[in-house]
C-alpha cells in the first residue's frame, strides 16, 4: 500500500519517507529524518528531534536514519546527531517499544529490539539481533555486541561483548546459548564460542590480552568465535564481568 500519513501527524518539509510507511496520529517526523520502506511510527513518537546536548548548534545539518521494516511504538524519541553531516542510525526490522529512547549518534543494528523504556545515551552502539530489556539503561559510548540479551532494569556502564546475557550492573550471567540456537548457529560455532567465553572471562589476567592471545594462537577458526575475540581489541570503556568472576573477586577487570 502507499505511504500513509495521518492528518494529525507532523512530517516536516525535507523529511524523506520510503514506500509503504505508516505515520500514525500525532507522530512527529522532523526534516532531519530519512526513513526506509515499510517503517511504522506510532502516535506521539518524535523522530529526528534535537539532541539533548547543551552545546548543540541547532543550525547543524545532521540526521536520523531508520532502516526498512522498523516499527516504532508510542512516545519513542530518536535524536539526531550532534556532528555535522552525521546521523543517528536504526537498522532494518528493528522494534522500538513504547517510551524507549535513542540518543544522538547511537547506532542500532538490524533486528534489534528495545523493550519499553529502554534508554540509550549518546554514542552507544547496539549490535544486530540484540534485545534490550524493559527499563534498561546504557551509559554513553558503550558498545553492546551482537545477539546480546540485556535483562530488564539492567545498568550498562561497560562494553558487553557479542553473544552473552547481561543483567543488573554490568554482570554477565551466561553465554546466550538459547538465542544463538534460535538463530541457527552451527554446532562448531557454538562449541568454539563457549570455549572462547570460558577462556576470556575465567583465565587470570587482562581480558584484552587474553583475547588477543587466543586470536594469535589460531585455534578458534569459526567466524563467530573470532568476532567474539576481536570485540575486546576495541572500545574506550572497560568490559562487563562474568558473574562467577565478579563474585570471586577475579582480576579480569578491564
Image: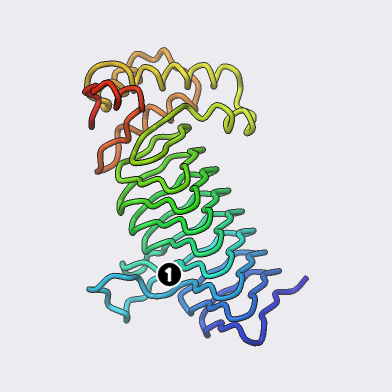
Q: Position of residue 228 (x, y in %)?
A: 42, 29
| Residue 224 versus residue 157 in the image, above or below | above
Q: Which quadrant is the N terminus positioned in?
A: bottom right
Q: Find residue 102 and report its horizontal and vertical position in percent.
A: 43, 61
Q: Quadrant location of the C terminus?
A: top left
Which residue: 58% across, 55% down? 95
From this view, report whether residue 149 is shown above or below residue 132. Answer: above
54 versus 129 height, above or below:
below
Q: Residues within 10 Å of mark 1 (few under 14, many from 20)?
A: many
Q: Give the image quarter of residue 208.
A: top left
Secondary structure, mark 1, is strand
Query: Quarter-wise, where is residue 183 in the image?
Result: top right
- Identify which residue is drawn at 40% across, 69% down: 80
| Residue at 36% in and 47% down | 155
Residue 24 shown left or right of residue 87 in the figure: right
User: For the image shown, how many numbered marks are present on the structure?
Assistant: 1
On screen, residue 65 above or below 244: below
Q: Which residue is mark 1?
A: 63
**Relative image position of residue 182 (x, y in whole percent):** 64, 32
Task: Give the farthest residue toward the right.
Answer: 1
Name which quarter of the figure residue 43 lies in: bottom right
Amino acid at each position: 500500500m502507499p505511504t500513509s500519513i495521518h492528518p494529525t501527524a507532523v512530517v516536516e518539509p525535507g523529511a524523506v519517507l520510503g514506500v509503504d510507511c505508516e505515520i500514525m496520529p500525532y507522530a512527529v517526523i522532523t526534516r532531519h529524518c530519512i526513513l526506509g520502506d515499510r517503517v511504522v511510527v506510532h502516535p506521539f513518537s518524535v523522530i529526528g528531534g534535537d539532541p539533548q546536548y547543551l552545546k548543540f548548534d541547532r543550525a547543524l545539518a545532521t540526521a536520523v536514519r531508520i532502516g526498512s521494516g522498523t516499527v516504532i511504538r508510542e512516545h519513542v524519541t530518536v535524536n539526531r546527531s550532534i556532528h555535522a553531516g552525521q546521523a543517528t542510525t536504526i537498522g532494518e526490522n528493528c522494534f522500538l517499544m513504547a517510551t524507549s529512547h535513542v540518543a544522538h549518534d547511537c547506532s542500532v543494528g538490524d533486528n534489534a529490539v528495545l523493550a519499553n523504556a529502554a534508554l540509550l545515551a549518546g554514542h552507544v552502539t547496539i549490535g544486530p539481533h540484540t534485545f534490550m530489556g524493559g527499563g534498561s539503561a546504557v551509559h554513553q559510548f558503550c558498545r553492546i555486541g551482537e545477539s546480546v540479551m540485556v535483562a530488564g532494569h539492567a545498568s550498562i556502564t561497560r562494553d558487553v561483548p557479542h553473544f552473552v546475557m547481561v543483567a543488573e550492573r554490568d554482570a554477565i550471567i551466561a553465554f546466550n546459548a538459547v538465542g544463538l540456537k534460535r538463530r541457527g548457529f552451527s554446532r562448531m560455532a557454538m562449541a568454539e564460542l563457549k570455549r572462547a567465553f570460558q577462556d576470556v572471562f575465567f583465565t587470570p589476567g587482562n581480558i584484552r590480552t587474553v583475547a588477543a592471545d587466543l586470536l594469535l594462537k589460531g585455534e578458534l577458526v569459526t567466524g563467530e568465535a573470532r568476532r567474539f575475540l576481536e570485540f575486546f581489541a576495541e572500545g574506550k570503556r572497560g568490559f562487563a564481568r562474568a558473574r562467577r568472576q565478579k563474585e570471586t573477586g577475579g582480576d579480569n577487570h578491564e
